[in-house]
Image (cartoon, rainbow, N blue to C red):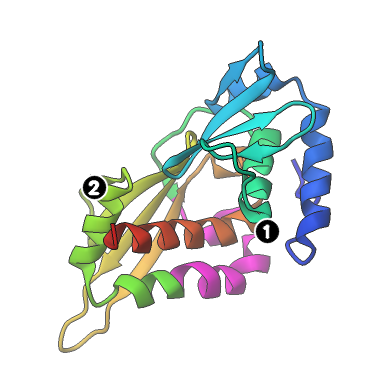
Amino acid sequence: MENKGSYFNLDETYRQAAVEFANLNPGEAAEKAGADYNSESNTVAVRFIDTVYSVNHPEAEVKDPHGNKASVYIAILILHYLVNAGGAPLTGRWISFRHLPGGDIYIDPFQKRAVLPFLKTFGNTPEKFLEAALKLGGEKVEQSGISVVVKTFPRVPICFTIWPGDDELPASATILFDETAPDYLPTEDYAHLPAMVNGAMKSKLGS
């Protein structure tokens, strides 16, 4: 599904996503997204990073476990996920942002919003990255560098990797996506999503 919203106007982007969600069958949308549907309350419960949010249908109000309305930023991501989810099974094969549809268009925002902040936060303290990612529910994977897979949504895992620096080379980092990523979110959302995870990892270090 094409991305019909732009983050330049959050309220309008949320409104468009809410309209699309209202037009969906919530039970079918939940099944494709790996979320839970409650037919009695007509709500979808979906995990985003480490919090389960509820979305009522057709109103498309997104609330946290305490009943508070989610920020418009989080609400947009959750609604986009439910609207776009196609149900494709994950493959475990990783692709770069550039290989997402139209990834070249958003590559600069992706680097600025996702990769560089991640590297700035944990590049010099990779052990803190591992600690924070595991606290967030991430799973360490064996490949070059220090790599952890964090499930942002039930079917949107992201692989964060840091290569520690040494006397000759500075630290470097990469962020990869399952090759089914286009089946679940518009490409622009993947320029924003890792920054949300990075922020959540930073907060885990203080907990």
145 with respect to 20 (left or right):
left
Q: Quadrant of the C terminus?
A: bottom left
Q: Position of residue 47 (x, y in %)?
A: 49, 35
Image quadrant where residue 10 sits: bottom right
Three-letter code, disc 1: Gly
Question: Mark 1 = which residue?
Answer: 102
196 with respect to 204 (left or right):
right
In this view, which residue lies farthest toward the bottom? 167
88 with respect to 141 (left or right):
right
Image quadrant where residue 19 sits: top right
Image quadrant where residue 45 sits: top right
What range of the chain is rendered magenta?
Answer: 95-115
Q: Position of residue 51 (x, y in %)?
A: 46, 40
Q: Which of the two labelled residues, at mark 1 and mark 2, occupies the earlier sequence position?
A: 1
Q: CA distance from mark 1 to mark 2?
A: 29 Å
Task: Give me the disc on residue 140.
Answer: 2
Q: Position of residue 192 (x, y in %)?
A: 58, 60
Q: Label 1's element?
A: loop
In this view, which residue lies farthest toward the top? 40
Q: Are marks 1 and 2 in contact (CB under 8 Å)?
A: no
Picture residue at 53% right of the left edge, 39% below the top: 180
Q: Quadrant of the N terminus?
A: top right
